[in-house]
């Protein structure tokens, strides 16, 4: 007979995420806002707005699915110039990222995305995700924006 691990219920995960995010924000001046998505959405959602240095605001979206916690950050609108170079830069940076990847989303905007199985979800892992996404955006944004809108920086 094997030991079958039952993960916490979705309601327990939801309550834990609420508590952990509030705990991260307490006394941390980088956190500008934490809010929940609309109550009628099919899956629970949170947004976390952080104050950036390179990018003025960094907004992380978390979506609790049946088996995973999905997360994403809007990084940059569709490049107006040097699009191929911007997308290449994002792809090359993917090689160094852990737990997230750059992706092209709606209207060719650049996002950072990832997901975590709920069986691996805990406070330390959520903290790692928030910190990693913040760092990846802060490190990548300056080079990407200068390429994507080069004429505005001359």
Image: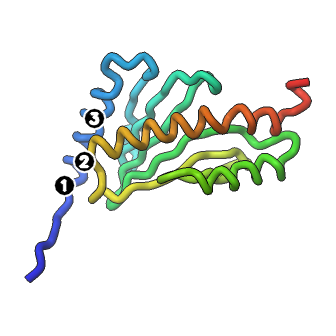
The quadrant the N terminus occupies is bottom left
Q: Closer to the N terminus: mark 2 or mark 1? A: 1
Where in the figure is residue 35, as x and y percent of width and height?
39, 29
121 relative to 69 in the view: left or right: left
Where in the figure is residue 45, as x and y percent of width and height?
40, 42
Q: Is residue 32 visible?
A: no
The image's mark for residue 51 is none
Q: Residue at x 64, y 25 (%)?
A: 54
Where in the figure is residue 100, as x and y percent of width and height?
52, 51
Q: Disc 2 versus disc 1: distance between alpha carbons?
A: 6 Å
109 relative to 133 in the view: left or right: right
Q: Closer to the N terminus: mark 3 or mark 2? A: 2
Q: Please name the residue that numbered disc 2 is placed on.
A: 13
Q: Please name the residue that numbered disc 3 is placed on.
A: 20
Q: How is the image coloured?
A: rainbow
The image's mark for residue 8 is 1
Q: Closer to the N terminus: mark 3 or mark 1? A: 1
107 or 122: which is nearer to us? 122
Local SS, label 1: loop
Vertical position of residue 47 compared to residue 25: above or below: below
Q: Residues within 10 Å of mark 1 (few under 14, many from 20)?
A: few
Q: Residues within 10 Å of mark 3 (few under 14, many from 20)?
A: some
Vertical position of residue 85 compared to residue 53: above or below: below
Where in the figure is residue 57, as x and y percent of width and height?
57, 25
Query: Hey, which quadrant is residue 82 in on the image?
Result: top right
Q: Disc 3 versus disc 1: distance between alpha carbons?
A: 15 Å
């Amino acid at each position: 007979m094997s030991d079958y691990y039952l993960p916490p219920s979705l309601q327990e995960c939801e309550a834990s995420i609420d508590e952990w995010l509030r705990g991260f924000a307490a006394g941390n001046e980088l956190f500008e806002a934490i809010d929940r998505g609309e109550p009628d959405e099919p899956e629970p959602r949170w947004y976390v707005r952080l104050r950036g240095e390179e990018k003025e605001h960094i907004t992380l979206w978390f979506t609790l699915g049946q088996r995973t916690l999905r997360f994403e950050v809007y990084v940059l609108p569709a490049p107006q110039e040097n699009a191929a170079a911007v997308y290449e830069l994002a792809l090359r940076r993917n090689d160094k990222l852990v737990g997230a990847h750059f992706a092209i989303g709606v209207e060719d905007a650049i996002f950072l995305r990832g997901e975590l199985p709920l069986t691996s979800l805990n406070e330390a892992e959520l903290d790692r995700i928030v910190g990693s996404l913040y760092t990846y955006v802060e490190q990548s944004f300056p080079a990407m924006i200068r390429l994507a809108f080069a004429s505005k920086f001359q």
